Image (tube, coloured by chain):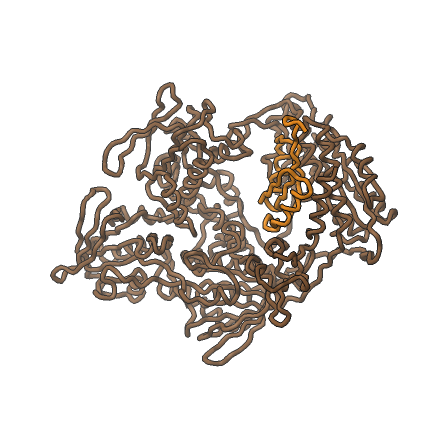
Chain colours: A brown, B orange
């Protein structure tokens, strides 16, 4: 590996920003889409982690002309290293995960829209920056050309995607429809007037979980959706506007001028990404994405190398996060033996018992070079602190976070027998753990610490008013000291973890998760309510890539059944659940017999099923079948399929309707695949697909293109008008409104396939048993849609497969691998830490109203029926304090943030 | 107190995970705003009860901001 020099010592840089302030070289800021400027020494963006500066050697005056070095002269911590060198690193590893991501399509290369010439044509990423509060215009929605507020904004979809012209990509980028809707909604919110937003699209592909709901909301909020592929836009002279010509719903040609035109650019693998893959010997597909199969979705073609995220295919954040956990899970299986083999244990000095000792507060005021001291009168703050009650020691430091100051602080704490420490410096968000470490090293409980934020929230934001900034800094120190005097040591206890896992659901997701857990050495119980393993995959013929599902399924079932680490329970129902993360007790009934399983984690993979429609003569006429029933005929090699003359698919049966307003995600691709299969069986067959939006997302677009080239007719129907299926003198007759022709049409098929919705189990008791939540559609609701897509808010419980949302087989496998990997993070621990900043309910004050139980988002509070009081489980409590706010009698105390401490802070703030 | 010299004293309860982080970021971005605010970090804006807000006014605050 080569590590490029950054010319800034990461250990010394305190990110004060003085270097960038004084650097004379301004360059366009690529992060802001070149709409603003940065310096030659910079941080890429404000949220960058770690927050450390870097010199751009391509722009730095010293590197170009041999003199300047302004940053080196000014840096208060001597972090600039102009002699920094490129380094070669060699790491010995057991597996490699490629997560190099993708790049946005660049519309400047083949500039068909005039993007490079006209400032009011921006890419969607640039528009994101325009909307951002930290962006070039401070979050004010204005046109780049003249900074005037726009009245009309257009989004052009599929820029560089679903397009086979020079430089563009044939696939669907999968993310642009939803982000364009989001941008339109945000733009409306940011606009002071009545902003007109229009999205010009081919198909709206909001196939992700809850995305259809968002699309509907956007339509209700007045975002216009215009089905029209725009290929040309013309500037309107002197106005900064651009003319878009399109055909409206009634077939009329329309011309509209827009203030801003946003190009919804797609995702692609860049040249560097492809080159790296090639150097590693990883096969790429014809679009330069990593070649992977449906059954091992994160494995590259080269053993030991895994891929995740948008380098595997264009995908959004939730899918990328699921991928990354999946890759970690699969790697974990491969390297299970190496676990803990490189772990070192830290030795910690024993904690001094403070019981009965009066509080002795020490205050350390940081100058942070000139960052604080340049604005705030630090010596005055020090003098002020000396006069505060309980304070026995005050000192100022040049840089409190430097290693020598830390060592000195440890000594001072010991020498002066300090037992409460206040550091007035930057922010606890970044530096609290560091100073707590200092307390631990001095033998003091780390919770006896409080920070006063006199940099980020004082000197940096009030630099033009040193007097008031100093007054505020004094108040902040006073507030911190008032609170610190009341701090009590908090203890963290531990509880042993049971190293078994429970997986609920014997479909592909459940079995895949069980295999990963077993491969990593954890005993797994796999529970299935029916008498067979396999779930919905039993009815599937081939994946969209054409891989044989039944052969794969048989192999997976065999490997699960022959695995000694996996106990399979068929015909089993869960009847009772006790316990929590690390120590669950689940009671199940198997063929009338009751048994209790003890396990440390729970994975819910209870699946979903295909809706059996009650319309279009389904169940009344044998020529009407569902998508899965057709799959079964493929599996059975049904000879009757050969003699069919006409087949019609109806999409969105039971999906995207008011009573079920979600997209079932898989049906478009499955119908395309089945239509191709029918064509293969009988090339003369007429095959029609009646659809609303064809959602062949990602690389599935290739299959859609193939289907059209093979003569399959895709007809966009008008959902507002009636679609009927009737029998007319023995013939099956489908009557529908064609959206393009604007008239009613009839087809007489001899097979009608209903692409039926995926529906969750209506009477699923698991949500209640494990106290986890369902979304409005009845699918399980994850802790965080983007960042924790397989976790529940309640610790130790995970979700995967169709139980979470409709998804394809490869996506279920990935999610199962991810859920197993997340579960291993618990199983791999010997003990769980409990306590610290958690809530504690004072039983004497509790009246047993259960208000706290209803507001706790983590299921951490239970009710003691005997004592008639609520009780917090410290293993589940996250310390949010919602209970303490809900309680009418202040019974719950959030340790470290209790009411008395809060009141002391308030008093400290207002009493000066 | 003269009307034009009035400087409100504002207590801001700020969620550790969002508003407090945002206030830090305002600092990193060197945005400027009046110095009247005294921030109190809480672990969640849901911790802030009507009690706390009333107590703050009782203690002499002219305004309360709950950021979360």
The residue lying furthest to the right in this view is: A415
Is A648 left or right of A696, judged from the image as shown? left
Q: Is residue A542 above or below residue A256?
A: below
Q: How many marks?
A: 0
Q: Is residue A521 visible?
A: no
Instruction: Give percent across and percent down for residue A177.
Output: 40, 42
Is A684 left or right of A895, judged from the image as shown? left
The residue lying furthest to the bottom in this view is: A593
Image quarter where the C terminus of chain A lies is top right
Q: Quadrant of residue A24?
A: top right
Q: Nearer the viewer, residue A804 or A64?
A: A804
Q: Is residue A192 above or below residue A831?
A: above
Q: Nearer the viewer, residue A507 or A851?
A: A851
The residue lying furthest to the top in this view is: A238
Q: Quadrant of residue A295?
A: bottom left
Instruction: Give percent across and percent down for residue A527.
Output: 48, 71
Image quarter where the N terminus of chain A lies is top right
Q: Quadrant of residue A726?
A: bottom left
Q: Is residue A481 visible?
A: yes
The residue lying furthest to the left in this view is: A729
The structure residue drawn at horizontal position 54% and vertical position 34%, both measured from the top left corner, is A133
Instruction: Give percent across and percent down for residue A720.
Output: 26, 48
Q: Nearer the viewer, residue A581 or A641?
A: A581
Is A690 left or right of A565, judged from the image as shown? left
Q: Nearer the viewer, residue A152 or A385?
A: A385
Instruction: Give percent across and percent down for residue A678.
Output: 26, 57
The structure residue drawn at horizontal position 83% and vertical position 47%, both measured from the top left corner, is A413
């Amino acid at each position: 590996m080569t590590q490029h020099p950054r010319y800034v010592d990461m250990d010394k840089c305190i990110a004060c920003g003085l270097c960038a302030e004084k650097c004379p070289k301004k360059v366009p800021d690529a992060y802001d889409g070149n709409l603003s400027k940065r310096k030659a020494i910079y941080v890429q963006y404000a949220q960058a982690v770690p927050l450390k500066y870097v010199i751009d050697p391509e722009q730095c005056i010293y590197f170009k002309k041999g003199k300047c070095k302004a940053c080196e002269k000014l840096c208060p911590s001597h972090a600039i290293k102009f002699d920094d060198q490129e380094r070669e690193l060699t790491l010995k590893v057991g597996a490699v995960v490629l997560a190099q991501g993708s790049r946005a399509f660049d519309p400047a290369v083949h500039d068909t829209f005039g993007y490079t010439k006209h400032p009011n044509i921006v890419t969607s990423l640039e528009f994101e920056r325009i909307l951002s509060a930290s962006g070039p215009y401070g979050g004010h929605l204005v046109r780049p050309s003249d900074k005037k507020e726009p009245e009309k904004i257009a989004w052009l979809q599929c820029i560089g995607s679903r397009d086979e012209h020079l430089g563009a990509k044939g696939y669907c980028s999968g993310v642009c429809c939803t982000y364009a809707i989001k941008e339109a909604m945000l733009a409306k919110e940011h606009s002071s007037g009545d902003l007109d937003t229009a999205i010009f699209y081919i198909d709206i592909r909001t196939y992700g979980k809850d995305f259809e709901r968002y699309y509907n909301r956007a339509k209700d909020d007045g975002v216009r959706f215009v089905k029209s592929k725009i290929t040309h836009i013309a500037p309107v002279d002197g106005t900064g506007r651009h003319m878009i010509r399109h055909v409206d719903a009634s077939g009329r040609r329309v011309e509209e001028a827009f203030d801003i035109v946003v190009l919804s650019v797609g995702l692609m693998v860049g040249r560097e990404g492809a080159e790296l893959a090639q150097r590693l010997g990883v096969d790429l597909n014809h679009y330069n994405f990593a070649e992977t199969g449906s059954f091992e979705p994160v494995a590259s073609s080269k053993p030991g190398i895994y891929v995740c995220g948008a380098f595997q295919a264009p995908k959004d954040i939730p899918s990328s996060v699921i991928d990354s956990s999946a890759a970690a899970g699969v790697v974990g299986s491969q390297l299970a033996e190496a676990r803990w083999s490189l772990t070192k244990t830290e030795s910690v000095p024993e904690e001094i018992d403070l019981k009965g000792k009066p509080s002795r507060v020490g205050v350390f005021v940081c100058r942070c070079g000139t960052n604080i001291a340049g604005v705030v009168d630090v010596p005055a703050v020090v003098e002020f602190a000396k006069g505060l009650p309980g304070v026995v020691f005050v000192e100022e430091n040049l840089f409190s976070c430097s290693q020598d100051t830390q060592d000195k602080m440890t000594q001072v704490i010991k020498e002066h027998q300090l037992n409460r420490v206040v550091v007035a410096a930057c922010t606890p968000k970044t530096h609290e753990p560091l100073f707590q470490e200092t307390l631990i090293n001095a033998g003091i409980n780390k919770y006896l610490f409080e920070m006063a934020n006199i940099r980020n929230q004082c000197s940096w934001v009030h630099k033009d008013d040193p007097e008031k900034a100093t007054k505020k800094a004094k108040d902040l120190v006073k507030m911190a000291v008032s609170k610190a005097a009341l701090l009590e040591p908090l203890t963290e206890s531990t509880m042993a973890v049971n190293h078994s896992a429970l997986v609920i659901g014997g479909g592909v997701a459940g079995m895949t998760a069980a295999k990963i857990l077993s491969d990593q050495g954890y005993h797994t119980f796999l529970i299935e309510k029916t008498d067979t393993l396999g779930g919905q995959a039993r009815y599937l013929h081939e994946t969209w890539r054409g891989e044989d599902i039944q052969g794969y399924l048989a192999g997976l079932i065999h490997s699960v059944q022959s695995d000694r680490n996996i106990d399979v329970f068929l015909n089993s129902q869960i009847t009772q659940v006790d316990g929590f993360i690390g120590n669950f007790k689940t009671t199940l009934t198997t063929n009338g017999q009751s048994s209790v399983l003890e396990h440390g984690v729970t994975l819910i993979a209870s699946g979903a099923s295909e809706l059996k429609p009650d319309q279009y003569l389904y169940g009344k006429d044998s020529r009407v079948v569902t998508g899965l029933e057709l799959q079964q005929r493929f599996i059975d090699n049904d000879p009757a399929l050969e003699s069919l003359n006409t087949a019609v698919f109806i999409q969105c049966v039971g999906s995207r309707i008011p009573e079920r307003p979600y997209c079932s995600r898989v049906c478009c691709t499955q119908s395309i695949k089945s239509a191709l299969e029918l064509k293969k069986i009988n090339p003369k067959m007429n095959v029609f697909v009646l659809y609303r939006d064809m959602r062949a997302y990602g690389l599935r677009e290739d299959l859609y293109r193939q289907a059209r080239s093979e003569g399959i007719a895709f007809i966009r129907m008008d959902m507002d008008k009636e679609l009927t299926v009737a029998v007319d003198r023995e013939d099956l007759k489908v009557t529908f409104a064609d959206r393009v022709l604007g008239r009613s049409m009839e087809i007489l098929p001899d097979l009608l396939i209903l692409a039926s919705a995926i529906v969750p189990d209506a009477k699923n008791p698991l949500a209640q048993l494990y106290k986890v939540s369902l979304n409005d559609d009845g699918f399980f609701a994850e802790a965080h849609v983007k960042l924790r897509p397989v976790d529940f808010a309640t610790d130790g419980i995970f979700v995967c497969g169709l139980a979470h949302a409709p998804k394809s087989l490869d996506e279920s496998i990935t999610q199962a691998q991810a859920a197993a990997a997340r579960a291993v993070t618990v199983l791999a621990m010997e003990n769980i830490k409990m306590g610290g900043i958690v809530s504690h309910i004072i039983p004497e004050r509790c009246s047993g109203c259960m208000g706290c139980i209803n507001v706790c988002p983590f299921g951490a509070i239970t009710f003691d029926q005997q004592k008639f009081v609520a009780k917090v489980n410290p293993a589940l409590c996250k310390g949010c304090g919602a209970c303490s706010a809900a309680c009418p009698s202040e019974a719950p105390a959030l340790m470290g943030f209790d009411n008395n401490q809060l009141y002391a802070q308030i008093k400290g703030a207002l009493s000066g | 107190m003269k009307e034009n010299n009035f400087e409100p004293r504002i207590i801001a309860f700020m969620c550790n995970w969002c508003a407090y982080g945002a206030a830090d970021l305002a600092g990193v971005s060197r945005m400027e705003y009046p110095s009247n605010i005294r921030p109190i970090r809480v672990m969640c804006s849901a911790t802030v009860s009507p009690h706390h807000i009333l107590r703050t006014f009782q203690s002499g605050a002219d305004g309360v901001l709950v950021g979360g």
